[in-house]
Amino acid sequence: MDHGTFMLMRSELDEHCTDLLESKAEEYARDNFDRLNQFKRGAHLRNCHSVEALTGMMLKHETSIHDMAGLVGKGEHFDRKKWMEKIGDLRNYLDLLFTLLIDEGEI
């Protein structure tokens, strides 16, 4: 793949991720302006650090991608929309992890 095509695909995924983050903000930060509230609440409920709560929730997305990749290796095909959904979720969790680390004073 040439550089221009790569950057175009990356922009498409970036836009998808941004749209998804915005829609999820309305769902998860509805009455609380803290975008990271779900991870802090999860940490409190599980008696762990908020970063651990986030990475635990992120694991669901990682395993889903792993499962899909294993099926691709066996000849299964998933459409572009499905891959964008799964990859976008994981990318967004990595962004949330980065901001949570900053918010918690870890970096």
Image (tube, grey):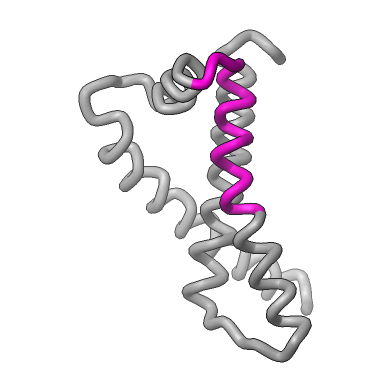
Q: Residue at x 59, y 60 (%)?
A: 87
Q: Which segment did they paint magenta?
A: 46-62
Q: Residue at x 55, y 33 (%)?
A: 96
Q: Residue at x 47, y 57 (%)?
A: 15
The answer to which of 99 and 57 lies nearer the viewer is: 57
**Residue 3: x percent and y percent?**
76, 70
For residue 24, what is the image quadrant?
top left
Question: Residue extending furthest top?
Answer: 105
The answer to which of 8 and 82 lies nearer the viewer is: 82
**Residue 28: x percent and y percent?**
32, 35
Q: Is residue 67 above or below residue 58?
A: below
Question: Residue extending furthest bottom?
Answer: 75
Q: Is residue 26 above or below residue 101?
A: below
**Residue 8: x percent and y percent?**
60, 69
**What is the chief secondary structure element of the magenta stretch?**
helix
Q: Is residue 60 above or below residue 85?
A: above
The answer to which of 63 and 35 lies nearer the viewer is: 63
Q: Is residue 88 above or below residue 51?
A: below
The answer to which of 54 and 45 lies nearer the viewer is: 45
Quadrant the N terminus occupies: bottom right
For residue 29, what is the image quadrant?
top left
Question: Residue extending furthest left?
Answer: 31
